[in-house]
Structure formats: structure tokens, C-alpha cells
Image (cartoon, helix red, strand yellow):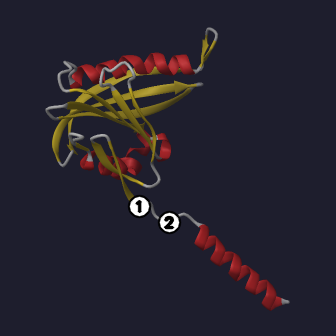
């Protein structure tokens, strides 16, 4: 009887080990002139193109700890700058959070304006200037600080505005994940 129990315990341990998730691997996303690498525990949740013929396209990638990378692709002729893009996200963030977490006139959340500063990071295989915003989401009396980083990659055909955002407490945990996406990001003319 003891041998049967020991054998069953050993079998359960082996099955548990075999079924446990392994270390995430690097996978490549490539579609319609955009490519980047991301870890396998991240997921591209949308890749949509505007139906109005504006050349407007968004790609959203979600990862652990509610981390988010969003890419907005526009024609190169668009006059939008990185500063203007980051400022528009800052304005939209507050109303989007309030709207999504409101019932009637009661709002369960609000966003406190934060700070903004210039940063540098490796994007598309080279150092790029960017913008870092720090802000807080107040949800049912709890303050949750966040960080967002913005970068711009462009070529003669497209501008790609890239946003990487996560709660501040998880910045160090997802930094390598963000780095994988940002450093490998490439634009190519879909010939």
C-alpha cells in the first residue's frame, strides 16, 4: 500500500512539473509592415485599421501585471508630434477612466495629473528620445501610481507612436518585456 501511495505521489509530482508553465519564450509578431518581438506570456489583443481610408492603424499588446503596449500608425505626412501625442493621451486618460468606472453621477475612479519628463530608450535598434509620464489612478480610495513611456519611430511612409504603460509597482518586473518589444520594433514598406 505504501508503494502505491509513493508511486501516486511521484506520478502527481511529475505531472505537476510537466504541466507547470515554462519560462516565456520570445516570439515575433509581423503583419502589414510592422514587426516586433514579445514574450510568449504577452498577447496581441487587437490590430485594427481604420475603415475610413485614413491609414490609421492601432496595435495593442497586453502582458503581465496589466502592462500595455499600444502602437498608433499614421501616414508619415501626418503633422502629429510625439509631444502632442503624449499630451493627447494624458487628456484622454482621465476621461476614459472616469467614463469606464462611472455609474450615473458616481465615479469610482479618477486620474491625478502627474509629471512629464524627457527620457531616452532603445527603440527600433537605436537610442531614441521619448517622454515619460507619471500619474496616479485613484480607485475607491486607493492610489495606484502608473508610468507611461512614449516613443516615435518613422520612415518615409509611416509614423509609429508607441506607448508602454504599467502600474509603477510593476515597472521593474516588466522592464525586460517592454525592452524586448521596443528594441525589436521595425517598420517595413509592405511591398
Residue 27: quarter of image? bottom left
Q: Which residue: 58% across, 66% down? A: 20
Q: Residue furthest top?
A: 105
Q: Do the numbered discs 1 and 2 sit on residues whose CB atoms are within 8 Å?
A: yes
Q: Report whether 141 appears left or right of 120.
A: right
Task: Tell me the element at label 1.
Answer: loop
Classify the position of the C terminus by image quarter.
top left
Q: How crowded is mark 1: few (under 14 residues within 10 Å), some or many (20 or more)?
A: few
Q: Where is residue 33 in the image (x, y as percent from the top left)?
A: 27, 41
Look at mark 2 in the image and give the residue it sits on. 22
Find disc 1 in the rendering and name its residue: 25
Q: Position of residue 145 (x, y in %)?
A: 43, 32
Q: Quadrant of the N terminus?
A: bottom right
- Residue ID at (55%, 21%): 100
Q: How crowded is mark 2: few (under 14 residues within 10 Å), some or many (20 or more)?
A: few
The one of 182 and 49 positioned closer to us in this rendering:
49
Residue 14's place in the image compared with 155, above or below, is: below
Point out which mark residue 4 bears. Answer: none
Left or right, residue 127 beside residue 181 = left
Q: What element carries label 2?
A: loop
Q: Seen in the image, is 124 located left or right of residue 43?
A: left
Residue 164 % position (x, y): 35, 37
Give the CA distance from mark 1 to mark 2: 9 Å
Amino acid at each position: 500500500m505504501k508503494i502505491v501511495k509513493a508511486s501516486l505521489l511521484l506520478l502527481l509530482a511529475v505531472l505537476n512539473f510537466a504541466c507547470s508553465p515554462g519560462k516565456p519564450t520570445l516570439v515575433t509578431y509581423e503583419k502589414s509592415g510592422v514587426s516586433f518581438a514579445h514574450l510568449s506570456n504577452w498577447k496581441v489583443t487587437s490590430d485594427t485599421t481604420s475603415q475610413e481610408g485614413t491609414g490609421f492603424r492601432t496595435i495593442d499588446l497586453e502582458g503581465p501585471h496589466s502592462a500595455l503596449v499600444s502602437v498608433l500608425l499614421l501616414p508619415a505626412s501626418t503633422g502629429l508630434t510625439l509631444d502632442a501625442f503624449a499630451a493627447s493621451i494624458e487628456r484622454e486618460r482621465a476621461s476614459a477612466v472616469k467614463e469606464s468606472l462611472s455609474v450615473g453621477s458616481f465615479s469610482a475612479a479618477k486620474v491625478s495629473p502627474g509629471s512629464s519628463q524627457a527620457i531616452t530608450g532603445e527603440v527600433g535598434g537605436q537610442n531614441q528620445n521619448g517622454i515619460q509620464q507619471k500619474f496616479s489612478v485613484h480607485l475607491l480610495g486607493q492610489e495606484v501610481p502608473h508610468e507611461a513611456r512614449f516613443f516615435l519611430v518613422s520612415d518615409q511612409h509611416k509614423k509609429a507612436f508607441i506607448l508602454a504603460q504599467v502600474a509603477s509597482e510593476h515597472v521593474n518586473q516588466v522592464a525586460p518585456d517592454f525592452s524586448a518589444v521596443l528594441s525589436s520594433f521595425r517598420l517595413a514598406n509592405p511591398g
